[in-house]
Image (cartoon, helix red, strand yellow):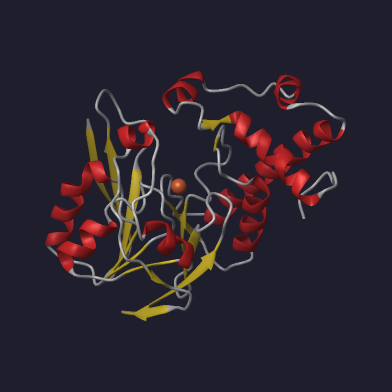
Amino acid sequence: MRILKKHDYGPVTGYEFGWSPVGRPLMTAYVYRIGPVLIDTAFAHVRKDIINILKADPPDSVFLTHHHEDHGGNASAIKKRFNVPVYGHRLTAQKLEKKYRILPYQRLIWGAGEPVEVTPFDDKWEGMGFTLVPVHAPGHSKDHTVYLETRNGWLFSGDIYLGDRIRYFRSDEKIADQITSIKKILSLDFEALFCGHNPRPEDGKKFLARKLAFLEDFYGNVAALAIKGMEEKEIMHTLNLTEDRFILWLCFGNVSMKHMVRSVIDSLMDQQHFPSMPP
Ligand SMILES: [Fe+2]
């Protein structure tokens, strides 16, 4: 099943893509367009669709929030087809300069991306009445970067929000870095939160603040028990944290609640002491 929707948010257009071999897609992914700029590129399974959309009015540059296959999956195809530069964090550039291994579930849900030359971007972009400023916001991934459009108060937030509450992490996500990044982002001046999967065009800051409260609460609860010497399983049982069995099965255990709990414990270990809250 394919989903392709166009959402108009004033001068911002959101293209929502979904794909699934059977039934409704578990998740859709958004590509945003402001003026000549495209932010993120969706995933390989919808490559023909996005190229067709862009044919009528090709972008003159592409910005990536991070390297994950549902954001950078068509960067190479768009760059080749329209001869446009692709910009991103230097870590995104490093990650995408050659083919990297993805897991079977990632190949099934999103498809494999292709290597692409990404130009490191750490300054601001200005044009057509817009100013786009990159803000490095690691935690979801090391390279994760959000883009603030300063004149209108739009934040293109990649995967930093996703929802007020979440139920699982990928194995490489870092909760303490996410908390630090969200605090940094909340100090910025914006209203609309253009999330890569769940846009909140109004009151975006309120929604992101709810996510921060959830993560801090989760961190504090898990840390309190870890400091007492409890192990992952016991912590999950005590806090009544359950796994989504389908997601666990589909992703071969790479996406789970256990990874959220483990991320708190890893953060405590990194600090070599057991404070109840992240720095
Ligand atoms: Fe991601």
* Residue 69 image position (x, y, % from top left): 36, 47
Q: At x 64% / y 63%, what residue is drawn?
A: 184
* Residue 49 image position (x, y, % from top left): 17, 48
Q: Is residue 230 left or right of residue 193?
A: right
Give the image quarter of residue 107: top left
Query: Against 221, is 81 above or below?
Result: below
Q: At x 30% / y 56%, what residue is drawn?
A: 115
* Residue 59 image position (x, y, % from top left): 23, 68
Which of these two is toward me, 150 or 244? 244
Q: How many numbered marks, from 0 up?
A: 0
Query: Against 32, is 243 above or below?
Result: above
Q: At x 30% / y 27%, what residue is drawn?
A: 24
Query: Against 157, is 238 above or below?
Result: above
Q: At x 18% / y 59%, what residue is drawn?
A: 54
Q: In this view, does 209 lie to the left or right of 55?
A: right
Specify whether residue 154 is in view: no
